[in-house]
Image: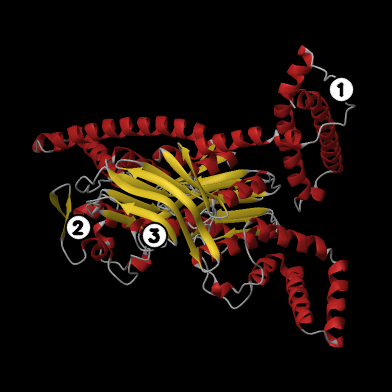
Amino acid sequence: MPLLRLEKVSLAYGHRPLLEQAQLEIRRGERVCLVGRNGEGKSSLIRLLSGEVVADDGHIWIRPGTRIAHLAQEVSPDSDESVFDIVAGGLAGLGKLLSQYHHAAAELAQAQTPEGMQRLAQLQHELEAGDGWRLEQRVETVLSHLGLDGDVGMHALSGGWRRRVMLARALVCEPDLLLLDEPTNHLDIEAIAWLEEFLMNYSGALLFVSHDRAFLKRLATRIIELDRGALTSWPGSYADYVRRKEAQLAVETQHNALFDKKLSQEEAWIRQGVKARRTRNEGRVRALEALREERRQRLNRAGKVELKLEEGKQSGQLVFEVEHVDFSFGDTVVIKDFSVRVMRGDRIGIVGPNGAGKSTLIKLLLGELEPTRGSLRRGTKLQVAYFDQQRELLDPNAMVMDSVGEGSQTVTINGRPQHVVGYLQNFLFPPERLRSPVSTLSGGERNRLMLARLFAQPANLLVMDEPTNDLDVETLELLEELLLDYQGTLLLVSHDRAFLDNAVTSTLVFEGAGRIGEYVGGYTDWLRQRRNKPAAKIESPAKTAKPPAQKPHTPSRKLSYKEQRELEALPGKIELLETEQSRLQASVGDPGFYQQPGETISTTLARLQAVTAELEKRYARWQVLESPLTVADG
């Protein structure tokens, strides 16, 4: 039995239909990804399912008792409540009780009073009666994994951090149906990886909108496409959808071409005049009228964004040379002993947790900040174009066309002048939208406008800070192709793993304590190189362990061939066991672990105990085998 069903649902804004006679079913345990071009109405469909919008026609059936939680694409305005209050509010009645307890405990820590202690005791009693401590643990776990401080006021957070808070609020209530609109926006890679694991183990149904290809490839069990008002279900993986969609579009294109050819022939026939109006041809005339009506009703697929970049003159061979640079804000070390050389044509990805200092590094390289220590040399003839993830360069009150033309009616692309109207049409902005204020644009449209503004500037150094947020997959792939053909230098800050893999040739990674590592290749290459590091480190316990005491003059025993092979294989076996142990410990620590069937819980705990015991045996055996060699080499 489905949790939710749409039956011939229609929705339109003004003259434009977003849904026409749409049909949809979602069942428990499904992870459904909703895809479609920017502006097709995906966010409107999510709001429709959450009850924020009412359909113009049709029926939406929701199984009685079904709990639905929704993360919107845009974040709500500032609030005076704390982060803990907002997140706990997702738990309804008990959430309010948790917030009261949280505040009472904080007040009691400041000043102990008999009234305060009595109030705290009363709240404790009520929480214990309602299983509140388990829910508090769930709130704290979600806050921790999303890097949120529960005591901070919502009003003190930026838009990206407020979005994290609203995501935590949606996750914490563990609803039957979870609606997520671009959940990975403004999350760093570590948080995205945690969210993936959380949703993989989520027992309810999930409907999400995402253009993060790595995220949706891992999660989606079914693809729902919104295309020209129609909802189409594509069972299977995202790769299956892409392959079958390409075949469908090819058939549609061929069919439209044959239809247009027939219509053209009939139009030529009708222009012959009197012969076409003879009685015996009245049926053919009526057929032509039907063809014309069918052509008028046909909704053509929106064209592709045409991305063209105004490349500047060639820069010098050296772009940046950084030697032993430190940078600190007061006592806080952001960058420590960092050295790198960037040459013309390099494509460098910059990766790290939110707040690690990625934007600070960009500002240092561009000269907006000066290093605390070390030297930083910039190359000659640099022309910089900068894409700002916060879109602060866009004036929300300005008209769309003025945001690119800056008062001029033309832009110059690769030496050729082009009218702003035609240029913005390449970015899928119809003429009627060009005089609208920027504030009326969706997130994806604002990103396209930022790209249009950026690419109209001549540049040989392209700096892009999170350019992929809100862009549809097709535009993302076109942007990748453009960057691959770009002859200048690229600095790319991104948490989109697939985009990094496809766009960059080396990666700078913030590794903690101000250290920045340099790796060849994209995100996947960095992961592989990082995984190889522990294999070398794993030798340290044996190397630092003291050998067993031996009597003087006792000759050391040499290992047999079999023992030598066993010793060489042990580090790899230990690493596999440690990886499994970490995964099992994370699973047991999950707030929903003990809500699973008893058999699953018992099996997992038994396996964790067995893995831990096996690890101890392997380490003990390793030390035994290492000891005679240590003595012999001494």
Residue bearing the label numbered 1:
553
Residue bearing the label numbered 2:
420
Spatial CA span between label 2 and label 3: 31 Å
**Residue in front for this viewpoint, 55 or 309:** 309
Q: Secondary structure at mark 2?
A: helix
Q: Residues within 10 Å of mark 2 (few under 14, many from 20)?
A: many
| Screen quadrant of the C terminus | top right
Residue 16 visible to the viewer: no
Q: How is the image coloured?
A: secondary structure
Check disc 2 and give the amino acid type: Val
Where is residue 372 drawn, in percent x and y?
Answer: 44, 62
Q: Secondary structure at mark 1?
A: loop
Q: Earlier in the sequence, mark 1 or mark 2?
A: 2
**Residue in front for this viewpoint, 535 or 577:** 535
Where is residue 121 drawn, in percent x and y?
Answer: 87, 77
Q: Are marks 2 and 3 in contact (CB under 8 Å)?
A: no
Residue bearing the label numbered 3:
363
Which residue: 85% across, 31% down?
617
Which residue: 80% across, 46% down?
596
Q: Residues within 10 Å of mark 1 (few under 14, many from 20)?
A: few
Where is residue 290 drawn, in percent x and y?
Answer: 28, 41
| Screen quadrant of the N terminus | top right
